[in-house]
Amino acid sequence: MSKQLLIAGGGIGGMAAALATARAGWQVQVLERASALAEVGAGIQLGPNVTRVLHAWGLGQALAAVAAFPERLSVRDALSGAELGALPLGARMQTRYGAPYVTIHRADLLNLLHAAAVAQPGVQIHLGQTLARHEPAEAAQASGAGAMPGVAVHTESGQTLQAAALVGADGVWSRVRAQLLHDGPPRVSGHLAWRTLLRQAALPAALRSQHVTAWLGPRLHAVQYPVRQGEWLNLVVITEGAPPADLAGWDHYANTAELARHLAPLCAPLRDLAAAAPQARVNEHAWRLWPLCDRPPLSGPGQQAQGRVALLGDAAHPMRPYLAQGAGMAIEDAAELGRCLAGAGPADDVPARLHAYANARWARCARVQARAIRNGQLFHATGPVRLGRDAAMRALGARVLDVPWLYSGGPAA
Ligand SMILES: Cc1cc2nc3c(=O)[nH]c(=O)nc-3n(C[C@H](O)[C@H](O)[C@H](O)COP(=O)(O)OP(=O)(O)OC[C@H]3O[C@@H](n4cnc5c(N)ncnc54)[C@H](O)[C@@H]3O)c2cc1C
């Protein structure tokens, strides 16, 4: 029983954790509240720090079969359309960091992690199971639920499961975190993400693109990049404004008149791309709206693990998406967790191993959270800050867009 692990949440972080810890010899049960594994229709960028981990797990081929490999990141002024700076991706990333920069549909990433996890012996995924609360197994034993040193998890359907440790990978509204840290709900960022996926074949040739393009405007920005081997284009527009009332159900069909108002002053290529969404849309609804919530950067390892309970991914360090690393940090967390739990024996000190995991992760995740907040301020800058940003980008280009400490760091593969 000593090498049994419970993971709450079967998203990208939970599935990556199941894979990494099963590879380390643990028996893993994943509780996912959804009745089917599903990711929203949207894209995700993965830097070389993340693809290095996926390659180390033997997922390089599976990734290549579904992802896109953009050659270039171009940063443009959203008002004039002029290029402010560019960073070569493609071969440069591979040469500099030993792994590629990829863009991928979230469902494709989740599917490949899930397939790899369930191919490991000892991984069980329980769908439609919502963690209600957890407690030390000794407490569950006292209330008659059964005996085992470790953690007991109670589900909303009335089941009790026990294991040596619990990983909360249950996202930004994490119940595991709420019970572990009692630090209240995440904070509302005041930023809204409008997301759509477009079929490139249905777009006018001038709007098709195989690059990552970030468009920076006053109090908004947009990012577009290819997914599904370049056949689809992911477009996200981030604006500032009040969130819808139902924050926790954070995936809403969008009011496109409101989006059009934000886009009106922007350059024609970006407006045209957004306007093409109804014709070229992939999903039933052209646009979906996500209010963005985050937390201040982690301030110590105790926020990422205590005793036999660890947090991972957005449950531990929900961040603004302006460094495109939230899922990346979840995958890095998973790799580090697997490394720390590898070789554990029957009499092993599981809390010490989880503490080692938190120690290895918190400062890097905090740095990424802080940088993401700063990027958001720079992306949306107005007035003199905007002028300074643009001048720096024009003068230094790739040197301000590359992030060596991030792309070359992360868990040892
Ligand atoms: C607009 C936008 C763009 C982004 N772009 C990028 C990007 O380019 N690159 C990048 O790396 N990251 C990006 N991110 C961040 C990334 O999406 C998240 O960091 C990542 O999805 C977090 O994964 P997770 O598994 O930790 O959490 P989640 O994806 O939230 O998964 C949590 C899972 O837990 C389940 N769950 C919740 N509560 C319970 C419970 N009580 N019991 C059982 N199951 C439960 C949920 O159903 C869900 O499946 C972006 C985010 C946004 C909003």
Image (cartoon, rainbow, N blue to C red):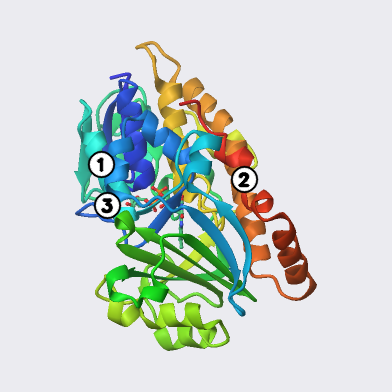
Task: Please give the name of the residue rendered at 25% of the width and 33% of the height, measured from the top-left corner.
Answer: 145
Give the amino acid type for the residue marked by disc 3 in the picture.
Arg
Q: Secondary structure at mark 3?
A: loop
Report the mark closest to the observer, 2 or 3.
2
Give the amino acid type for the residue marked by disc 1 in the picture.
His
Mark sitting earlier along the chain (3/1) = 3
Provide residue 246's location: percent of width, then percent of height.
41, 72
Mark sitting earlier along the chain (2/1) = 1
Q: Secondary structure at mark 1?
A: helix
Question: In the rendering, which numbered label is found on residue 388?
Answer: none
Residue underneath mark 2: 403
The answer to whether mark 3 is within 8 Å of ligand 1 is yes
Above or below 118: residue 253: below
Question: In the rendering, which numbered label is found on residue 114?
Answer: 1
Q: Is residue 321 visible?
A: no
204 or 99: nearer the eye? Answer: 204
Q: Residues within 10 Å of mark 3 (few under 14, many from 20)?
A: some
**Image quarter in which the N terminus is found:** top left
Q: Quadrant of residue 202?
A: bottom left
179 or 114: nearer the eye? Answer: 114
Give the amino acid type for the residue marked by disc 2 in the picture.
Val
Q: CA distance from mark 2 to mark 1?
A: 29 Å
315 or 66: nearer the eye? Answer: 66
Mark sitting earlier along the chain (2/3) = 3
Question: In the rendering, which numbered label is found on residue 33?
Answer: 3
